[in-house]
Image: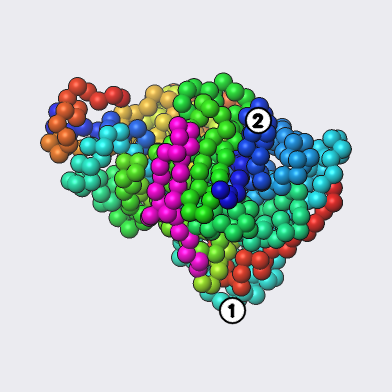
Amino acid sequence: MKEAVVLTPTGCIGNRGIHRETFLRALDEVKPQVLAMDGGSLDPGAYYLGAGWAHSPVLNVKWDLELLLTHAVPRRIPIIVGSSGGSGARPHVDTTIGFIREIAQARKIRLKAAVIYADLDPRYLRARAAKEKIPGVDHDRVLTPEMVDQGSTIVAMMGHEPICRALDMGADFVVAGRASDASAIAAFPIREGYDTGLSLHMGDILECGESAAKEREPFLRDVDHNRIPILGRIRKDHFLLKPMHPALACTPESCAAHSLYERASIYSSIFPGGVLDKRESRYSAEDEWTTRVTGTRFTPASPYTVLLEGVRKVGYRSILVFGVRTPRMIAQIDSILEKAREREFTTFSGVQGLQIHFHVYGRDGVLGPYEFERAPRPHEVGVVVDVVAPTQEIAHDVGQDIRSRISFWRYEGRQTTAGNVAVPFSPSVIDVGAAYELHIFHALPVKDGNELFKVEILEI
Amino acid sequence: MSSIPMNELCSIVRTKNAGPFLFTLDIVFRERAVYEAVKAHRLLTREQLAAAYGVPVEEVVVFETFDNVMAVKASFRRKITAASPGDPDVYAMNQEVPALTIRFPLARLPAGVGAQGAPK
């Protein structure tokens, strides 16, 4: 039967690490035609995109890359990684290429890498924003030229098209910048002529690796590198999913349940260039370990739009942690914190863009505005003070001032005149570095999925 | 006892970001008969979830049921963009708690539910 055989070795490069034995067995037994996976997401927050940092441990990233390079390249199995290095901007992609070079050199492996940057030229985007209404996604703020100017990093999420082009050029390793996770996995089967809807749905389930599988017996928690490769076989009108370790199974329930995960709707998801419609998707058991999926459809959008993700620097962050155990102080904690905050804004009144946030554990530290429980009063309260200011020095100063002010705050009935709170660290104020927030999350119309993304070949 | 906490009938009650501007609540029921009763008697609604979270009903932007896995899904507009200063839960992994306050009247559930004390 004609089919494309895709192996997703891990739900995310560097995230806990690929289970070596299972991976090597899978390469021999199922002879995958491609290894496809993602390397990150926006979920860990704006910081990683803004600062160019990875959010997976380097040790595990190298573990995964070493396995991929030393075993797939000699077998001539192409490797595709989307959202390389975490957020998929230029520094993340370049870090990934650096690791690949280092390992290839040490292992004497030669390969053709295709690099696809996802960074957007701000001048181009500014000009577009000045003359068009570029709509927000999940919010209603139209993109303005000023928002583009404020952006420290802006990436566009690619679909399968540039990745297919990289495969056309004979790449052994496609290092893609920000990409739709599902598209990175769907690229190979779409290029082979398989249905776009089924390919994307397969990618959409495979992208989290064994998260879509059920554990038949406890296994994963006793393994260090415990990401389990999952096999996807796509045919004319269905695809099959199977974990490569027998302790795990892809069941109709576990695969269907994955359409709940981390997405707003079960039945409809927006991907680069269109909408995936799962209303007619059906899941059935093929055998004990394997699930068959049919019926998913893709409706191309006109015009084609790509999702933009952009962050701006809001200043520098310092944090302060302290605990309160004194019952009289806990009874007045709300008013003490609010008044202390007001005083800081007066003391530092010339400071533009100063933010002070309190995370009060024991009160509403977890639920914030959704907290509904007000009593009974906790016996202990933990406070994390988050200060964001235009410079690190000012943020630090504000933190020090708050520590001192709250330590000696003369609240009603106070007996702790040598100091009010327990500070667990010295220095008590911790400088975190630049702080970012996401401000661009917009849908940019383009001619087609290739327009924004250039494929560059590197001989390594 | 004339009502039972919803989560005693569930295998999953969880939240997570669905992009930086939304978080999504997944509720998966354990028994088919309970799930069917929840749907038939409209025991769980968009309005009820909005009330549990103390938000206007328009902030619950998606409300869906999923027969395949006996699930109800609701997606909420976030009050603070994920990971912006002031956000208490960057991944929105722990925002399920207000949903735990929802209770179902036993009279509307299949006979025997809650009688022997549902597993905690």
Identify the disc placed on residue A131.
Answer: 1
What is the chain identity of the residue bearing mark 1?
A
A193 or A327, which is in the foreground?
A193
Q: Is residue A154 visible?
A: no
**Residue A12 image-quadrant placement:** top right
Residues in magenta?
A278-301
- Marks 2/1 same chain: yes
Q: Assess disc 1: are there few (<14), some (14-19) or many (≥20) residues with their C-alpha within 10 Å of its C-alpha.
A: few
Quarter of the image with the C terminus of chain B is top left
Residue identified by numbered label 2: A25
Element at badge 2? helix
Dot 2, how many residues are within 10 Å of its Cα: few (below 14), some (14-19), or many (20+)? Answer: few
Quick one: SS at disc 1?
Answer: helix
Q: Which quadrant of the figure contains the N terminus of chain B?
A: top left
Q: Residue at x 39, y 23 (%)?
A: A379
The chief SS type of the magenta part is strand
Residue at 17% x, 46% y is: B41
Residue A203 placement (x, y as % from top left): 55, 49
Question: A294 or A305: nearer the eye?
Answer: A294
Q: Which mark is residue A353?
A: none
| Residue A129 on the magenta segment | no
| Residue A337 coordinates in the image, percent (x, y) | 46, 39
Q: Where A318 sits versus A157, above or below?
A: above
| Residue A160 or residue B3, whichever sits in front | A160
Most distant residue in the front direction: A1
Q: Is residue A235 above or below residue A168?
A: above
- Asked if the residues shown at circle 2 and circle 1 are in contact, with their CB atoms under 8 angstroms apart, the answer is no
Residue for point 56% across, 20% down: A222
